[in-house]
Amino acid sequence: MTRYARVESLKSDLGVADLVDLPAPQLDEGEVMARIERIALTTNNMTYAVYGDALGYWNLFPAAQAGYGCMPAWGFAEIVESRASDVTTGTRIFGYFPIATHLRMRPTTVTARSFVDGAAHRTGTPDVYNLYELQPRDTDPRQDSLTAIYRPLFITSYTAADYLRERDFFDAEQFVVSSASSKTAYGTAYCLTDSPAPKIALTSARNIDFVNGLGLYTATHEYADLTAVDPTKRTVYVDLSGDPALRRRVHEHFGDQLAFDCLIGSTHADHLPEEDESLVGPAPVFFFAALQLDAYKAEGQSRAFMQRYQHDERGFLEHVGRPERPSIELLEHAGLEDAPAVIAGFHDGSTDPAVGHIFIPNAG
């Protein structure tokens, strides 16, 4: 008998997650059932949860339990049942899923390359989260795992670098990157290689060796050693931690030399930053990759952007996945039973950044 289950996160304490069994859903006309093949869990999923209400992530996959939300994840699935005439069973897709065994979907805007989930509750979120790309069937599982882990993160890194590049990097003489062991952080450092300014990593003591081993930063410092970074150079702060105490220290340390504070993600914060007029220097600017992608679409630049992005993504995946020195070890989990513990590890910061967690929801 097919099991239908998903992981739901307690909104008031994001370190708590439950694996919930669900009744078998019945498809309506125009709907399909996707059987989720593999999804990746990273600290990025915690960012989605942190901003679940503020940016609408909780709306994408409504939870069954009151006070809970379904944390989204990226990965691959196969259409195993269809009542939609233009999407056949056996179709394989890549996109945004709950941490679950299955997802009921309503395909709209179907093309030879993709479709959109037009379910009513998914309106009001950026297009990129509702788009599912059709995928070939015979692919390398390791490559699929790397794609599931890095694509949603690297596209954020890539568009953030574009954002800074379009503004001449704010004439930065150095970039300071917090939570430097996070995949989005070192993806951003990779994407900023066309700027000669040094990329300086801030990270926890336990992650120093990992960050140094990436070969993407000019120098690495523990958070406590922020004062060792030259305060006289014009600095762009690339904030992946979202830690308000660290942000204040950065602003005080660099003062008038802080050219821009780009808040890309949140590995340590639990809400959007509030405006703080007492901060020295420029106010933080929250960067939302989906809005940048929507802007490319509005300008008619989507295809040109994606061609450029796909080429550069291949180079990045080759860098992080090189067999002789991979940046991460892939750890596959059969089923979803381990997901609550992995989520708790992301929440309390105990997860090893050198491990990439892949879940095969329907294994076993």
Image (cartoon, rainbow, N blue to C red):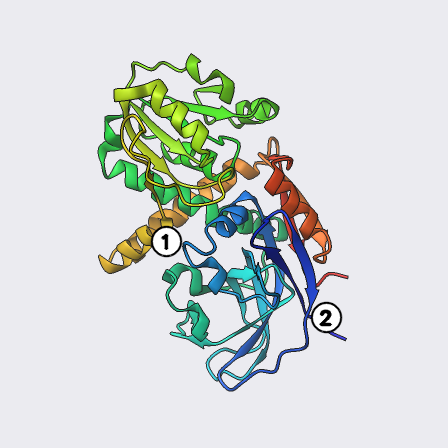
Write down the residue under mark 1.
Answer: 290
Q: Does 81 sit left or right of 341 as displayed?
A: left
Give residue 124's quadrant in the image: bottom left
**Residue 149: image x %, image y %?**
55, 47
Q: Does 39 sit left or right of 318 as displayed?
A: right
Write down the residue under mark 2.
Answer: 3
Q: How many callouts does the rendering have?
A: 2
Q: Is residue 256 above or below residue 168?
A: above
Tell me the residue at 60%/31% (across/down).
325
Q: Residue 22: in sight, yes or no?
A: yes
Give residue 78's quadrant in the image: bottom right
Q: Residue furthest bottom?
A: 29
**Residue 286: image x %, image y %?**
34, 43
89 and 200: which is toward the camera: 200
Q: Residue 151: in sight, yes or no?
A: no
Q: CA distance from mark 2 to mark 1?
A: 33 Å
Give residue 362's quadrant in the image: bottom right
Hey, what amino acid is under mark 1? Ala
Check the picture and name the quadrant holding the C terminus: bottom right
Q: Earlier in the sequence, mark 2 or mark 1?
A: 2
Describe the element under mark 1 as helix, strand or loop: helix
Query: Mark 2 near mark 1, Cβ–Cβ under 8 Å?
Result: no
Check the picture and name the quadrant holding the N terminus: bottom right
Tell me the residue at 23%/26% (across/down).
171
Tell me the residue at 69%/60% (across/down).
19
Give neighbour class at mark 2: few <14, some 14-19, many 20+ (Cα, 10 Å). few
Hey, what amino acid is under mark 2? Arg
Q: Is residue 194 above or below residue 114?
A: above
Q: Does 32 sit left or right of 257 as displayed?
A: right
For residue 89, the mark is none
Give neighbour class at mark 1: few <14, some 14-19, many 20+ (Cα, 10 Å). some
Describe the element under mark 2 as helix, strand or loop: loop
